[in-house]
Image (cartoon, rainbow, N blue to C red):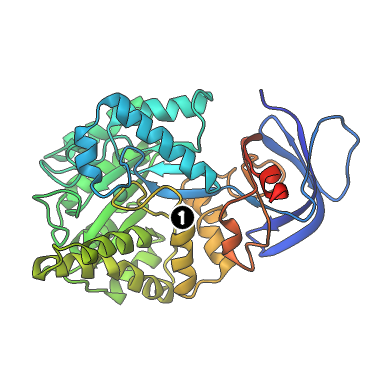
Amino acid sequence: MRQSILISHAKVVDVERNLVSEEQNIEIDGGKIAAVSIERRGWTRVEIDASGCYVCPGLIDSHVHLFLDAGAQPRHTFFESSDEKKLTTAHLNLLVALSAGITTVRDCGGPAELVFRVQRAVERGDLTGPRVLAAGAPITRPKGHCHFFGIEVTTPQEAARAVEQQARKGAAFVKLIASGGGLTPGTRPEEADLPVEIMRAATHAAHASGMHVAAHCHAVESVVRALETGVDTIEHASFTGPAGMPQFDMEIASRIKDKGIVVGPTAISGIRIAHAIRASNSHNETTRHSVARLEARRHHLSRFYEAGVSFIAGTDCGVTNTPFDSLADELDEYVQAGLSPAHVLRTATSASARYLRLPLLGQVKDGFIADLLLLPGNPLEDLRHLRNPLLVMKEGEVLLDRRMASAEV
Ligand SMILES: [Zn+2]
């Protein structure tokens, strides 16, 4: 049952205006923020005394794979697991994300039936975790990247049908696999895969059903196709040239900006996977390209920033060595690339919510959904305060409360 709650003595973080308002009372009713004001009305209700704490919007991770286990061999583990085991993995991942202050995740591809089942279970309140925006099965070419849980298409008509079918099952958006990927043997990140006509048909069908489109793009050519197609977010944007080495192109980056397409950099997973390859015995001439491509995501951040491209914070959690609390590390990468903490915070809150068409998420304001974090310090000054939030609230429900634990220490 959602209770009516008052959070008193809060320092409210305004991520849009980059400021903090002290001594605020946040009234929460029916899962929404009813009022934020210095005044306090005399209703009887549950009170959370936030003295000394900052109240910030819950975080959004725009690129995760709930059904991958974030271990050393996620694809292998996925194949080995029963449906029951896969569901357990997804639930554990949700709990890890929640404990890191993440109240919304966008699942960028998984076994459709199970993903939609988890999405619905969270929605109904049967499963504790961040809300899930699911793509369901990613759309890929025959034997393309992620084909093992994707829908393989060969014509624009098939692509449009796949989109409509997934929309009926509960998809919140569409994921297109525009190039090969490191996780799928037999595909090559430097090669564009889906033809432009298929991407266009899928994007058209998605937009007609009110869904946005995220395109997985490593190859430079796949980024160009994504631009021509009018997708909404470009994932990874690795700019991998035909020879397999990174080849950032400022002119293409400017076109991304001009078209208002948003980039999900997923830098942290690239860095983690590259690290795993470097640390293994298998690091040789063949993996040199993979490492360069993966680490380029970090180097590209400042170039994208320079080009004025908008970021949406996303990690690719679930892939190799990238657990579901990796968002804070992803955000750190953006700070290193030159973005201000406030700008970075918006990529995981208010701006992300706008790009994902969730207008009532991502801000602590009247009328917004009460997804809130209680933090020990001001995240606009130092994003490290986002790590280990003292309290996590989703839709007005306290799902995690560490205040007593921290008081006892
Ligand atoms: Zn991914």
Residue 113, how many percent across, how many down? 30, 26
Ligand 1 is within 8 Å of the C-beta of the residue at disc 1 = no
Look at the image and tell me whether residue 120 can be seen: yes
Q: Determine whether 279 is above or below 357 in the image.
A: below
The amino acid marked with disc number 1 is: Leu
Decide if residue 171 is in sight here: no
Q: In the figure, is residue 44 to the left or right of 314?
A: right
Q: Residue furthest front?
A: 409
Query: What's the residue at 34%, 43% (across, down)?
Result: 65
Look at 13% across and 59% down and name the residue there. Answer: 191
Percent from the top left, x then y, of residue 319?
Answer: 30, 49
Q: Is 189 on the left-hand or right-hand side of 216?
A: left
**Residue wearing tag 1:** 327
Residue 133 in which image quadrant: top left
Residue displayed at 19% across by 41% down: 76
Q: Is residue 7 above or below residue 122?
A: below
For the N terminus, the image quarter is: top right
Displayed quadrant of residue 313: bottom left
Determine the secondary structure under disc 1.
Answer: helix
Q: Depth check: give the residue in front, 279 or 140.
A: 279
Q: Residue at x 61, y 50 (%)?
A: 389
* Residue in front for this viewpoint, 168 or 77: 77
Q: Position of residue 164 (x, y in %)?
A: 29, 30
Q: In which quarter of the view is residue 90 placed? A: top left
